[in-house]
Amino acid sequence: MYKIAVMPGDGTGPEVVNEAVKVLHAVAAKQGFKVETQNFDFGAERYLKTGELLPDEGLKDLEGFDSIILGAIGHPSVKPGILEVGILLKARFYFDQYINLRPVKLYPNVWTPLKDKGPKDIDFVIIRENTGGLYTGMGGASMVGTQYEIATQQMTYSRPIVERCMRYAFEYTKKRNKDNTLTLSQKCNVLTHVGDLWVRTHEEVGAEYPDIKRDYNHVDATTMWMVKNPEWYDVIVTSNMFGDIITDLGAMIQGGMGIAAGGNINPEGVSMFEPIGGSAPKYEGQNVINPLASISSIEMLLNTLGEEEGAKLIDKAIYQVLESGQIKSMAAGHMGMSTSEVGDLIADIITKM
Ligand code: IPM
Ligand code: MN
């Protein structure tokens, strides 16, 4: 019996999360485990009504769950940054979700902007460190508004924070057992302190994994190769901000935000799974948003819970639906079917498997 907290959030978040929960229940029925969900209304609406983002009692409540499903956070009615920092980042930090796992996988029949590349070429995973670096918010500003205004924001990393991420990445690469290559994406030619810490940690932890090949790319070059030779990659490990940037590129080459999923993982604690796209408020309430990203995030949720067979069912069902060509496009409003029809289709395939 798993207790799952559901935070639908803003915009189209509730619509995609509905389908994800539907699919989770289908997997549970098939695999013979029980799931109990409880909804939490953190997001723009609650904030505008009460001034509350993610209060301490909310965090305490969430602590009692095995995992969290998140829809999307962010709404034009609230100044950018408030909801993102106050809810999404707050949860990532509070639950110490130090891994942001973002698979970049092109399914069959899904359009990619990369010419001459197909599902065989685009199948890698980006492991983004999720609690350190520029996201710690360390720094400050002075003389704001004057011509001498100064602002700093520091890229902060400690050895333990880098090391635990690196260990996870090596273990993940080993378990994935595809090309057994872990590429570090950094910028050690400029970041002579932080980049160097990452390079040494990659080498030192890597020495414990003689069967895993180590590779290194500067992060700017990574964006070139992700476009030109995505087939070179198996697993990429990188720091927080670099990972934020390159995973948006990853999302695009796998068919767009409609299909890109992310897991905020604390392997020993409460993890949180989300579609990596935004809340797409312009499509809110129309039943046209693509729920596959959210559904795909459930695959990671199940893997984290140790329900690996159940996770595979989701991957198979998504593969089958896309291979059949029934979904015309990954873009909202162009799928040729509604949000709930996509969810029904996936749930149905799983039930009949
Ligand atoms: C992401 C998002 C977030 C991030 C924002 C909304 C704070 O871009 O999950 O990639 O920067 O991590
Ligand atoms: Mn991002």
Image: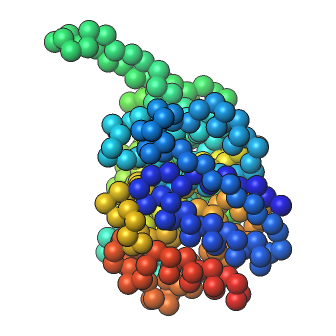
Q: What is the x, y in percent for residue 345?
A: 56, 84
Specify the quadrant that holds the N terminus: bottom right
The image quadrant of residue 249 is bottom left
- Closer to us: 6 or 271: 6
Q: Is residue 282 left or right of residue 293?
A: left
For the residue pair 216 and 94, the one nearer the viewer reads as: 94
Q: Residue at x 77, y 76 (%)?
A: 29
Residue at (63% x, 85% y) in the render: 348
Q: Nearer the viewer, residue 301 or 169?
A: 301
**Is residue 128 visible to the viewer in this orientation of the structure?**
yes
Image point (48%, 42%), residue name: 46
The single residue placed furthest to the front in the displayed view is 49
Is 278 left or right of 130, judged from the image as shown? Answer: left
**Is 118 above or below relative to 162?**
below
Tell me, what colour scheme is on the image? rainbow
Give residue 202's position: percent from left, percent from top. 61, 40
Q: Quadrant of the C terminus?
A: bottom right
- Residue 276 visible? The answer is no
| Viewer-side residue, 240 vs 217 | 240
Numbered marks: total:
0
Up/down of 183 relative to 198, above or below: below
Farthest residue toward the left? 147
- Image x and y of residue 298, in percent: 63, 64
Q: Position of residue 2 (x, y in %)?
A: 79, 58
Residue at 55% from the left image edge and 62% from the top image edge: 17
